[in-house]
Image (tube, rainbow, N blue to C red):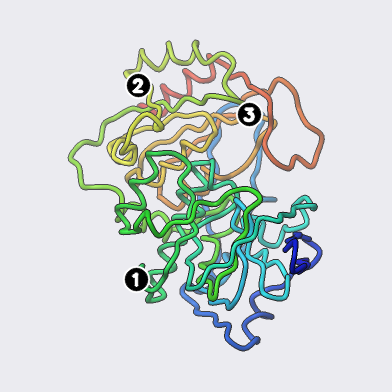
């Protein structure tokens, strides 16, 4: 809930105080514009190399919800994840990454750093999009297509609440014609209140992406190229790295793979658009699979303690030839495994080379 103290202006987030689109659109001055109908989620059969065999069924709902734009008067944007709180102090979890799973959110978020701005603000933000490239590209930038299809333009808003997780991501804003001077960069502990908010739906459901997101990203950020024979290996740094990656790289080089780190390239989408096969450890860099041509082969290397369908579902949306290999993590968390695993993992070398040989036939 939000408590208003004229002197302290304390804003306190409480997940127990929630409201939903169907409730707020009946309040004066609020409007809902449908852009995409609800549709059945249909994914390709999961192809796997080695063991253990896994399933993503528990993460994938039957349907995508109806998606569109909510215009909300005198509402708040809360913190770095861009949570929406209406003027009565209720959180709208449908616009967050959590959606119907809002009970997974921890409580106790509050701030005294509150700013009131006149005018209209467009929300292009989502959970972790301020620091994670995958959430920035798919969950935040993906909302812009809903905004445009609803008939709006950038000239209809005074502000854009949008993260810029690194300097390379500015290219996406520039190509969409979003002026940097209109952007408000989300920060932890800072909240804003606007006369009016334009709030696009979360583009899909968490971890599962609709085809229109891929179509939008390809159209806006890739050019037509005659090259279609790059072999890319996408490494990972930080946590959840492959502990025996040096052995895999020796094999990959034998098969003429490039060791490609998207963060080191200003225009990484073009490299993925020119790839015939992409191999990579599970991580945000695989969001660029959205730019691959239909039929591109994909081998995702996934730790056993971090089983999530992000890049399987994205590959299905992009019509890619997706394959999965599970590597044993150094330790396993108890169920339910919510959030990211901290553990590195190991890939069986023989199984890996056999998979590569089969995919390259």
Looking at the image, can residue 68 be seen? no
Q: Nearer the viewer, residue 300 or 119?
A: 119
Q: At 60% from the left edge and 68% from the top edge, which residue is drawn?
A: 193
The extreme left residue here reads 226
149 over 295 or under it: above or below: below
Give SS at disc 2: loop
Work out whether mark 2 precedes mark 1 in sequence or the reverse, and give the earlier one. Answer: 1
126 over 75 or under it: above or below: above
Q: At 38% from the left edge and 21% from the top edge, which residue is drawn?
A: 259
- Mark drawn on residue 155: 1
- Mark drawn on residue 303: 3
Q: Residues within 10 Å of mark 2 (few under 14, many from 20)?
A: some
Work out whether mark 3 precedes mark 2 in sequence or the reverse, and give the earlier one. Answer: 2
Image coordinates of residue 300 in percent, x first then y, are: 51, 33
In what quadrant of the picture does the N terminus appear?
Answer: bottom right
Image coordinates of residue 285 in percent, x first then y, are: 46, 36
- Mark drawn on residue 103: none
Q: Mark 1 or mark 3: which is in front? A: 1
Looking at the image, can residue 26 be seen? yes
Which image quarter: residue 336?
top right
Q: Which residue is mark 2?
A: 257
Q: Nearer the viewer, residue 341 or 255?
A: 341
Q: Marks 3 and 2, Cα distance to the nearest angstrom?
A: 22 Å
Give SS at disc 3: strand
Q: Are marks 2 and 1 in contact (CB under 8 Å)?
A: no
In what quadrant of the picture does the C terminus appear?
Answer: top left
Give SS at disc 1: helix
Work out whether mark 1 precedes mark 3 in sequence or the reverse, and give the earlier one. Answer: 1
Q: Is residue 41 left or right of residue 106?
A: left
């Amino acid at each position: 809930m939000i408590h208003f103290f004229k002197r302290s202006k304390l804003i306190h987030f409480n997940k127990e105080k929630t409201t939903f689109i169907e409730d707020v659109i009946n309040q004066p001055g609020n409007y809902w514009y449908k852009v995409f109908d609800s549709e059945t989620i249909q994914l390709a059969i999961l192809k796997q190399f080695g063991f253990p065999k896994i399933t993503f069924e528990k993460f994938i709902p039957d349907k995508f919800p109806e998606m569109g734009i909510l215009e909300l008067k005198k509402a708040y944007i809360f913190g770095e994840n861009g949570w929406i709180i209406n003027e009565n102090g209720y959180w709208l979890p449908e616009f967050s990454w959590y959606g119907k799973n809002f009970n997974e959110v921890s409580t106790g978020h509050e701030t005294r750093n509150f700013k009131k701005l006149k005018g209209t603000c467009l929300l292009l933000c989502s959970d972790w999009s301020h620091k994670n490239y995958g959430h920035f590209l798919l969950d935040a930038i993906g909302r812009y297509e809903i905004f445009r299809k609803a008939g709006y333009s950038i000239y209809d808003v005074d502000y854009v609440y949008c993260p810029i997780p690194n300097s390379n991501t500015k290219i996406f804003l520039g190509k969409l014609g979003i002026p940097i001077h209109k952007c408000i960069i989300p920060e932890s502990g800072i909240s804003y209140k606007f006369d009016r908010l334009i709030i696009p739906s979360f583009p899909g459901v968490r971890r599962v992406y609709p085809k229109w997101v891929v179509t939008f990203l390809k159209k806006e950020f890739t050019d037509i190229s005659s090259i279609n024979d790059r072999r890319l290996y996408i490494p990972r740094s930080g946590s959840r790295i492959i502990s025996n990656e040096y052995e895999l790289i020796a094999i990959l080089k034998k098969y003429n793979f490039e060791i490609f780190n998207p963060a080191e390239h200003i225009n990484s989408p073009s490299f993925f658009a020119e790839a015939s096969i992409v191999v990579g450890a599970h991580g945000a860099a695989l969001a660029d699979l959205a730019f691959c041509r239909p039929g591109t082969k994909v081998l995702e290397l996934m730790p056993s303690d971090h089983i999530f369908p992000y890049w399987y579902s994205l590959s299905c949306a992009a019509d890619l030839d997706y394959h999965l290999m599970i590597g044993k993590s150094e330790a396993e968390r108890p169920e339910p495994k919510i959030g990211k695993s901290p553990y590195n993992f190991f890939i069986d070398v023989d199984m890996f080379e056999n998979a590569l040989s089969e995919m390259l036939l």
